Image: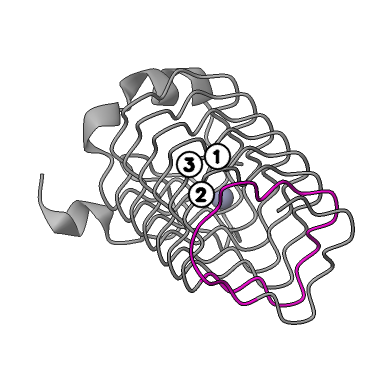
Amino acid sequence: MSSSHYAPVPCSASRCEKHALSGAAYCWTHLENKGEFIQSLNLSAMVDAWLAEIDLAGRDLSNANFVRARLSGANFAGANLSGADLRRAFLDGANLRDTNLRGANLELAVLGGADASGADFTGADLRRSNLVGTKAHGADFSQADLYYARPGNADLRASSFRGSTIERTIFRRANLSDTDFTAAHGTANFESANMQGMKR
Ligand SMILES: [Zn+2]
């Protein structure tokens, strides 16, 4: 498949200013056979795919390859993305509520403005990821690698970071109330963070 296949093209619906999904003529909103489209996805080869706003809630997407994929505003609520390769993926504004991201690779991924409340990031690679303004109430970041991740202004209340790597992690102005940082290692930036009730 040539890389030009994934160059964003406009949605074919009149007056729609969104991009068409990769392999389709329409954006998610205007796509008619949504179920058929999802069935046609080759989950092992979604590199660079444009899939903004797609609804994959509750789906088994384990070990899928979404490297650099555009998943802004997508719905992954309750989906299984364990072991998925999401390096440099755009997940800004995505719904990651109760999503299984155990062991997923999210290096350099963008999760700004996403809602990952209740998500399981156990053992995930979040190095250099952008978590600015991410909401994640009661999420599990146990054993995750957050080296140089940027959860500035993130709302991470009641989340667990047990045994995680937080070397150079920038928690500036983040809400870390009632979080658990037991056995987390590394020197993070907690400037102006809310650390009320934090366990260390
Ligand atoms: Zn459209």
User: Which of the pair 19/130 is nearer the observer?
Assistant: 130
Specify the amino acid type for callout 1: Ser
Quarter location, residue 14: bottom right
Specify the amino acid type for callout 3: Gln
Specify the amino acid type for callout 2: Ser
Query: Which residue matches tag 1?
Result: 142
- Mark 3: which secondary structure? loop
Other-residue count near label 2 (Cα within 10 Å), few / some / many at <14 / 14–19 / ≥20: many
Other-residue count near label 3 (Cα within 10 Å), few / some / many at <14 / 14–19 / ≥20: many
User: Which of the pair 32/73 is nearer the observer?
Assistant: 73
Other-residue count near label 1 (Cα within 10 Å), few / some / many at <14 / 14–19 / ≥20: many
Is residue 125 magenta-colored?
A: no
Contact between marks 3 and 1 (CB within 8 A): the answer is: yes
- Relative image position of residue 22 (x, y in whole percent): 34, 45
Contact between marks 3 and 2 (CB within 8 A): the answer is: yes
Is residue 175 magenta-colored?
A: yes
Question: In the displayed structure, would residue 35 be above or below residue 104?
Answer: above
- Rendered image: mark on residue 5: none
Query: Which residue matches tag 2?
Result: 164
| Residue under the point 57% across and 72% down | 188
| Residue under the point 72% across and 63% down | 154
Most common secondary structure along the magenta stretch: loop
Query: Which residue matches tag 3?
Result: 143
Instruction: Calculate the distance from the C-alpha at mark 3 to the C-alpha at mark 1.
Output: 4 Å
